[in-house]
Image: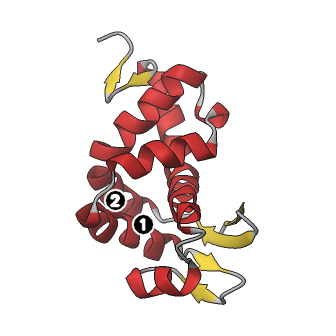
Amino acid sequence: MTTETFIVGNREYTCVRMNAFAANKLFLRLQKVLVPVLGALVSQKGSIGDVDVKEAAMLLAEHLDEKIIDDIVFPLFAESRVYSVKDKRQIKNGTDVDLCFTTENLFDFYELIFLVAKYQFGPFIKSLASRFGGLVGGKTAEQ
């Protein structure tokens, strides 16, 4: 199982690659939020690898609400086994967020959401873009 490490702020987090079935189920939910956000950023930057994490987190925060956090982000974190190394805690619900983040570093939570989503779905989105053209706002560049 592949493990990825992220440093956000001054803290270390890890996650694992999800299996394809779980990833597909979450992507079907996430695409309404993720594809337009990533499409807009990628169209500006040229590739998902060139997207600034803080800029992406800010844009993502503008498009999230409580339902998306509960129905998409927490299941994404649970399937990805997102883990705060400092807090020795898996992040999969609101209580975990309260124990791993404060109001001072809450924006780190949004950066972590972006990094986990990029890690899980970035290769898929790159593959889609290479097969069907660049994604912009949920549509291909040719549309």
> Hey, what amino acid is under mark 1?
Leu
Residue 34 as seen in the image, left or right of residue 45: left
Where residue 113 is drawn, which disc sits there?
none
Q: State the image quarter where residue 67 is shown.
A: bottom left
Q: How many marks?
A: 2
Q: What percent of the width, then of the height, locates residue 64?
A: 33, 54
Q: Residues within 10 Å of mark 2 (few under 14, many from 20)?
A: some
Disc 2 and disc 1 in contact, CB within 8 angstroms: yes
Q: Is residue 124 visible?
A: yes
Assign a secondary structure to mark 2: helix
Q: Quadrant of the C terminus?
A: top left
Assign a secondary structure to mark 1: helix
Residue occupying the far top of the picture: 142
Residue at image location 49% in from the left, 21% down from the top = 43
Residue named by callout 2: 26
Residue 13 drawn above or below residue 62: below
Residue 118 drawn above or below residue 100: above
Label 2 and label 1: CA atoms lie apart by 7 Å
Residue at image location 43% in from the left, 30% down from the top = 39
> Hey, what amino acid is under mark 2?
Leu
Residue 97 as seen in the image, left or right of residue 5: left
Q: Nearer the viewer, residue 38 or 17?
A: 38
Mark found first going from the N terminus, 2 or 1: 2
Residue at image location 37% in from the left, 62% down from the top = 21
Q: Nearer the viewer, residue 108 or 26?
A: 108
Residue at image location 27% in from the left, 67% down from the top = 71
Q: State the image quarter where residue 69 is shown.
A: bottom left
Residue 69 as seen in the image, left or right of residue 50: left
Where residue 76 is drawn, which disc sits there?
1
Q: What percent of the width, then of the height, locates residue 58?
A: 49, 46
